[in-house]
Image: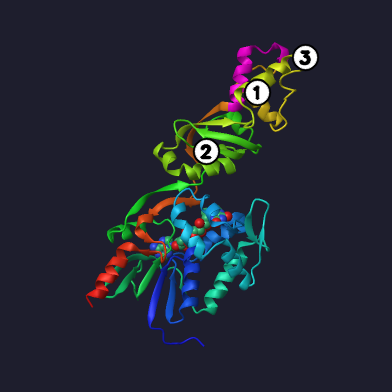
Amino acid sequence: MRENKKARKAAIIGGGAAGFFAALHLAEIDPHIEVHIFEKSSQLLSKVKVSGGGRCNVTHACFDNRTLVQFYPRGSKQLVAPFKRFSPSDTITWFKERGVILKTEEDGRMFPVTDSSQTIINCFLEEAQRLGVRIHTQQGVSTFVREDNHWKITFTDQSHFIADAILIATGSSELIWNQLKSLGIKIEEPAPSLFTFNIKDMNLHELSGTSIENTSLKIQGTKLKTEGPLLITHWGMSGPAILKLSAWGALDLKALNYNFTLSVSFLPEENDETLLTKLKNLQSSESRKLVSTFSPFDVLSKRLWIYLLGKSDISIEKNWADLSNKELQKLMEELLHGNYKVNGKSTFKDEFVTCGGVSLDELNFKTYESKNFQVYFSRAKSSM
Ligand SMILES: Cc1cc2nc3c(=O)[nH]c(=O)nc-3n(C[C@H](O)[C@H](O)[C@H](O)COP(=O)(O)OP(=O)(O)OC[C@H]3O[C@@H](n4cnc5c(N)ncnc54)[C@H](O)[C@@H]3O)c2cc1C
């Protein structure tokens, strides 16, 4: 039986994945703490609902923590110890113990077998009920200040709550960052991470939906480069390779104001020399065939091939034999080093991922406490 009289109160600010998971853990490990979640909207776990296309990509089947941290563009060093304490295996077990079975897809992503994010939401809500976590929706926090030995939380409707401890899990929130700044906590400039590139090229837009299984991408004037699948969209380029580049380059690309030149190789296994030789050989082996109807590269769709011929200023009426050395050189360049002027990125109301926020230097990664306030508490304790 849980005790009715709970001495201490913990306020979790934010009813998203992080807030819920923290609340459930806290309630589980210490039944003497009264755990409250304060969520500003009427919806709990709303991002979990839409994550993974509504299926919720819960974790990743990567069981070597040193490898796992390498997927993080920032904070990989700091994540080693936390993953040692709670890894993807622990996530799988945690859900299994609560009746939620996860499955692994070919690329390592793990989803509930129901293929529905609602399964994860239901699990969290049922656990919260079982553990007596108190949930308050439409309770937006506007300020939290330290008073004597507790925190005074003020809500947007001017009501208050007194807590012994607070846990901030508000995702990317300007208001909360400003509040934390006023408490002396260093906040890194936020920047969107995981976005797609806008390219003003009507001919390219007509290829919308075309995907290329393997490409190699570079951003000129930077060290940013990656390889992977590319997707052409109505507004430019997307797909795993672009999203990866946007995550690793989040800060650099923001500094460039999302204006830069993307260099694309559609045939990453080729180099200038091997490709030029192949193209020259076609002049004799396929001499009478039209360049437009005979593409030597199965990995490129016919529409993409015609587009690349156009970008190389090669008439689609020409036979392979009629191509000049200059045209072959230009075609090789478009296939291996095609330049695309990016001006802008996709804008989502809620970015998939935002980097920045509370500086990693501010946190004790054993407890996730603010180092600032640890000092404050130990000083307060020693003066008691
Ligand atoms: C479309 C989309 C798809 C995604 N797909 C995936 C995926 O497949 N896999 C994956 O791992 N991640 C995915 N993500 C990212 C994932 O959803 C987030 O990383 C995760 O939800 C972050 O959880 P959080 O609890 O830190 O923040 P949030 O989910 O943003 O929760 C923060 C909560 O705090 C509340 N809040 C904010 N300010 C206040 C305040 N002042 N007072 C009270 N409450 C406040 C907010 O209303 C919100 O409910 C996706 C995100 C989006 C948008």
Q: Is residue 212 shown left or right of residue 11?
A: right
User: Looking at numbered disc 3 in the image, what kind of residue is underneath it?
Assistant: Arg
Q: Name the residue under label 1.
A: 274
Q: What element carries label 2?
A: strand
In this view of the protein, which residue sits in the foreground, 129 or 188? 188
Q: Quick check: can you spot residue 158? A: no
Q: Quadrant of residue 37?
A: bottom left
Vertical position of residue 176 compared to residue 38: above or below: above
Q: Mark 2 points at which residue?
A: 197
Q: Quick check: can you spot residue 360? A: yes
Residue occupying image coordinates x 39% and y 39%: 255
User: Looking at numbered disc 1 in the image, what kind of residue is underneath it?
Assistant: Thr
- Counting every numbered tag in the picture gives 3
Real-space CA distance between mark 3 and mark 1, rounded to the nearest whole angstrom:
22 Å
Magenta-span inclusion, residue 334: yes
Q: Name the residue under label 3.
A: 288
Magenta-span inclusion, residue 11: no
Earlier-in-chain disc, 3 versus 2:
2
Instruction: Please provide percent x and percent y for residue 354.
Output: 45, 51
Q: Is residue 126 shown left or right of residue 187?
A: right
Point out the stretch of residues depicted in magenta: 317-336
Earlier-in-chain disc, 3 versus 1:
1
